[in-house]
Amino acid sequence: MPWYTDFFTELPNTFWRAAVPVEYTTAEIDFLMSLPGDHVLDVACGSGRHALELAARGRRVTGVDVSAEAVAHATREAARRGLDAGFQVGDMRALPASAADTAICMGNAFGYLDHDETVAFLNGLTAETLVLDYGFVAESFLPGLTLEEEPMTIGGVTAEQVNEYDVTASRWLTHFTFTRGDEVHRGTSVQHVYTAAEVRRLVAQAGFQKIDLYAGPDRAPYTIGSSRLILVARR
């Protein structure tokens, strides 16, 4: 089974729900709202950080994520806020049929799949517009790479990380231990590292014609050393 199918339980989800500052989400939603399309498919939506805010601004949103805990959290939040957002448990490798105008894949989920699965994921999308948010692109990730990271405590959960880079497969592996009191969850995340050109070629081969590369939601041009890649593609 892929690593992510049982990785995102309550402890890591609680950690990441608290990890992103509100202003980061606001900037990303402002950016996404500038793109066309009424119906958004949020792939690997997690706990609904983007989907809920898009719905709050009037978009119709469908969120899909492999984590039942995250989907339950997002569903409760949508109901509490009276938002037009539906969430379902699903795998990126077998997405449900969707008539969405725009598909988004945010927060590095693009790098979760093996290469052939990544190709199949992109080829299976039917949306007119695609947005990929990817921090593990080689030109961002490899400059200044260090294996050592200090433990972090966010949202009452402590995350310890032991990292390694698999040069034969261009993969970044992080062995996580999440703790909160006596609760412990261990898991290893796997991120496949592509160059920006490789990502662009994959997207083009999936039928998207106009492809823009940005360094962030402010639309600054992507360059080596940028902290992340935001790719916007249109058919």
Image: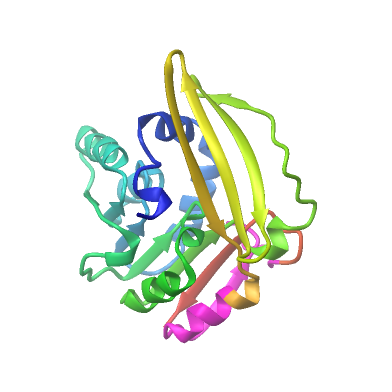
Q: Nearer the viewer, residue 97 or 145?
A: 145
Q: Nearer the viewer, residue 147 or 44?
A: 147
Horizontal relation, residue 218 to residue 47: left or right: right
User: Residue 178, image x and y in percent?
Assistant: 49, 28
Quadrant where the C terminus sits is bottom left
User: Residue 218, image x and y in percent?
Assistant: 62, 57
User: Residue 25, image x and y in percent?
Assistant: 49, 44
Q: Nearer the viewer, residue 149 or 235?
A: 149
Residue at image position (31%, 61%) is: 41
Residue at image position (52%, 59%) is: 133
What count of labels does the image hold?
A: 0
Residue at image position (40%, 70%) is: 117
Q: Quadrant of residue 185?
A: top left
Q: Is residue 37 above or below residue 90?
A: below
Queried whether the magenta region covers residue 211, the answer comes back as yes
Residue at image position (40%, 43%) is: 49
Q: Quadrant of residue 124?
A: bottom left
Quadrant where the N terminus sits is bottom left
User: Residue 113, image x and y in percent?
Assistant: 45, 63
- Magenta residues? 199-222
Queried whether the magenta region covers residue 118, the answer comes back as no
Q: Is residue 169 visible?
A: yes
Q: Quadrant of residue 231?
A: bottom right
Q: Is residue 91 above or below residue 6?
A: below
- Give the residue furthest to the top: 181
Horizontal relation, residue 59 to residue 17: left or right: left
Q: Is residue 136 visible?
A: no
